[in-house]
Each structure stands twice: as structure tokens, then as C-alpha cells.
Amino acid sequence: MSRPWLFGGGMLAGAALAVFYIVRVPDAVEPTTDAVAWVNDRPISRASYENALQAVAGDRKSGTLREDDRERVLQRLIDQELLIDRAMELGLPERDPQIRNQLATAMIAFLVRRAEDEATVAGEVELRAFYDEQRFRFERSAQYRVAVEGGAVPLPGGLLLAKEIEQRLGPSAARQVIELEVGESVVVGEGAGRYTVHLLERRDGVLVPFDEARDAVEAAYLRDRSEVAVREFLEVARQHTDIRVEAER
């Protein structure tokens, strides 16, 4: 993906571009020692500068920077800070619905990224505790082998998941089939469309061992921590914010 804003000869393309950089401030590391420039006492971190340089190099066919790229990128980042300042002065975050939505989305992304960074250092104890607490997430679904007598409903002969039976027979018939005991049958449909489904075999769902499910456990743990981080932030923010609802309900 090209990034023309880094090379445009004029102003940057719109205040919406400022969203990432408004929310990126908490990510800055040691701004007093890691800044490449300051705009109104606000630092442009070296990390932001290096990321922008990498993006530019990645857009080059050669994969390398040109002689004047470093200065140009730095000036574009300074321009961006100036635009952010003016956007804030004009109250665009309060007045522009698109910018408000982008800011909210960017803030959620920041909270999720921070929570994931913290969760990635989780040890075996934390993951096993999560696995034990959320065992239902790591169970293999039950499987069924059925045979159809009469009608023209195609069903493969192997073991099927409940959702696969539902896709072929419909929700109502699938519910009846999975409630059968092995060896039992159920008549489905009416008139010329009637057919009989026999349940030949059932394999109940089983819990996948932790060692086998570890990658899935870690991924689910990261998602869970991210959701909790956003929810806790909003709960605390509500407690410390003056909120008055006057709209009719």
C-alpha cells in the first residue's frame, strides 16, 4: 500500500490522518531522550520516525531509502503535528462524526494492543488456569453418523458435526437427530418429502488436552484479556466522568 502523504508537496490529506498520532502518544518511549523533534513541547518519538522510514522503504521497489527521504519524512511528521494542533483548536474531534469514530476505534485498538502485550508474557500457570476455567472453549464438538432412508436428501457416510447435519436437513430436523439415541430413528418432512433418518453412531464432545490445545488456549486468552481491558477502561471512565443523560428514552 502506498503512502503518498509522506511525499506530497503540499499539506497533508485531511484531519482524519491525525487520528493515529493523537492516540499514539502513550506508546512513545522516554520522550525526553527518544525524540527526533519537538512541536509545541510535544515530542515526535524516534520510534514513530523509524516506523515511518520503514514504511517508505517498504514502498520502494529497491526496499531502500533515497538520499532525501529522512529529511522529507521528518518534515511530514512535523506537518502532521501542526495539523493535529489546528484540528484540536477547531474542535474537529467534537464536530466531525468520522473523526470521532476513528478516535474511538483507535483508542480501542490501543487498549487491545497494550492488553495483548501484557498477556503475551503469561506463563504456564495463567494459561492452565484459563484453560480450566474456560474448558467449554476447548472441547471437540460431538459427531454423528447417520443414514437417510427415502427422500432425496444427500448425506455423506462419515461422521458429521451437528452444524453439517443442519446445513443438509435444516435446523428442526438436525435438533431431532442429535437428540436420538444410537439405533433410534426419526421421520422428517411431510407427504412425498418424508424420509427417515437413522442415528448409527455418536461420538460425544471431549476436552482437548492442554498440550494439544495450547495455541488455541493462548489465542483465546489474548482475546479475553483484550475484551476485559476495554470493558474495565469504560467502567472506570464512567465512574470518574460526569455523565448526564437528557435524551428521551
Image: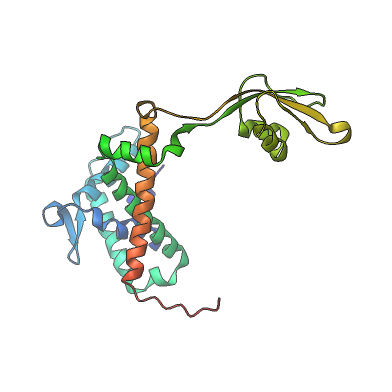
Quarter containing the C terminus: bottom right
Query: Residue 90: horizontal and vertical position, in percent?
Result: 36, 74
The vertical placement of 96 against 134, above or below, is below
Q: List x then y, in percent, for residue 217.
A: 37, 36
Which sits in the foreground, 133 or 184? 184
State the residue at coordinates (62%, 34%).
Answer: 163
Relative vertical location of residue 34 with respect to residue 145 in this rendering, above or below: below
Quarter-wise, where is residue 196 in the image?
A: top right
Residue at the limit of the structure toward the top, as seen here? 157
Q: Nearer the viewer, residue 136 or 12?
A: 136
Residue at x 81%, y 28% (from the top left corner): 195
From this viewpoint, is residue 14 visible? no
Question: What percent of the width, then of the height, locates residue 97?
Answer: 47, 66
Image coords of residue 190 (percent x, y): 85, 36
Asked if residue 8 lies left or right of residue 192, the reply is left
Work out whether residue 244 can be spotted: yes
Furthest toward the right, the residue is 192
Residue at image location 44% in from the left, 61% down from the top: 101
